[in-house]
Image: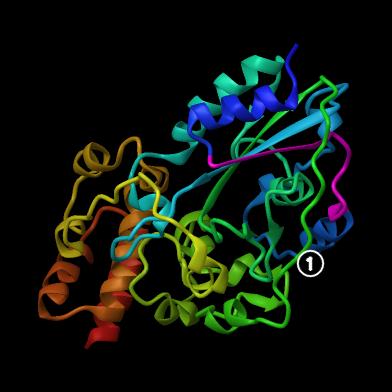
Amino acid sequence: MIDSVTIRQQARVLGFDLCGITTGTKTEHDASFRQWLADGCHGEMRYMTRRPDPDQLLPGVRSIIVVGLNYHNPGIPHVARYAAGMRDYHDVMGEKLNELAKLVDGVWYVDTGPILERDLTQRAGLGWIGKHTNLINRRLGNWLLLGEVLTTRELVPDAPERGHCGSCRRCLDACPTGAITAPYRLDARRCISYLTIELKGSIPVELRPLIGARVFGCDACLEVCPWNRFARLSTIAPRALPPLTEMLAWTEQQFAGYFRGTPMFRLKRARFLRNVCVVLGNIGDKAALRALAHAVQDSDALVREHATWAINKLA
């Protein structure tokens, strides 16, 4: 007989830092999420419009197991901490979730399915959704990767967590682009993580200077959260990037050879170099100008456009 205690024990064996259980019912923020979509705050992330109820993902679902994996590390320049360990978290989490799902004949998701996972995580008692719209745990702060296992088994649910942000607004004040337009509301179209990862085309010119030195993602709102004083370092060691000017001259083969199997690989060469051009335009020197002069001859129009902008900004 598989019970909640066995599931939690197995989650710990697999390396998860958190494990909770909730029901398979619709999340309470479903209506506000749909309004957020109607307002266009999801930008080009059209996959977010395909967020059915849990029962549509697994007919007869009764319970959802939610897990968290701590990724807190010292970080490296230019890259969000979750990607600093380089190996794609979809693979890291997926391997563990697949084993956990076998216990309950369930199906698992880690950013791979249309699930409002932060709602589920709060309902499973693992933390609360902060004003920056990310999950916060009292023991680990907000450096958490989340995943879920849906099952038709009836499991005893945990008590939900309540919010503990109080009057704090550090995350709102820290956002470089003002993407957190109000507590608990993010306009993805202004978020640096969206601009450098999800956006397929040109980065809006007015937002490029605000990206600063960030090539992939942004941790500004996460870094200032006071609950991080309880966070402990994970076992995921960061791997440094080569110099930006060096990467700007990389071929498709060089890019793939270095980044395959990492979160950065999903960008492909053109979007990654687009971001490198913006960063060099913000923080570059004479060496950056020489690299950008080469990039304006790049075979990809997206790279050429952003390289030209960066040269003009430095000049």
- Given residues 228 and 186, the one toward you in this image is 228
Instruction: Tell me where residue 238 appears, x and y as whole percent.
Output: 29, 51
Quadrant occupied by the C terminus: bottom left
Quarter location, residue 156: top right
**Residue 187 spot, x, y in % from top left:** 66, 69
**In screen coordinates, is 124 left or right of 237?**
right
Q: Is residue 61 above or below residue 208?
A: above
Is 28 a magenta residue? yes
Going 19% across and 70% down the picture, which residue do you hit? 292
Left or right: 34 as drawn, with respect to 65: right
Q: Which residues are magenta?
A: 17-30
Tell me if residue 175 comes above or below residue 38 in the rendering. Answer: below
At a point 68% along the width and 49% down the height, the residue shown is 126
For the residue pair 22 and 190, the one nearer the viewer reads as 22
Q: In the rendered view, does 185 fall on the left or right side of 139?
A: right
Q: Quadrant of the N terminus?
A: top right
| Magenta region includes residue 101 | no
Neighbourhood count class around disc 1 (C-alpha, 10 Å): few under 14, some 14–19, many 20 upward: few
Residue 4 position by quadrant:
top right
Expressed as whole percent of the image width and height from the top left, the position of residue 305 reads: 34, 68
- In the depicted structure, whether residue 36 falls above or below residue 255: below
Give the residue type that dot 1 points to.
Answer: Asp
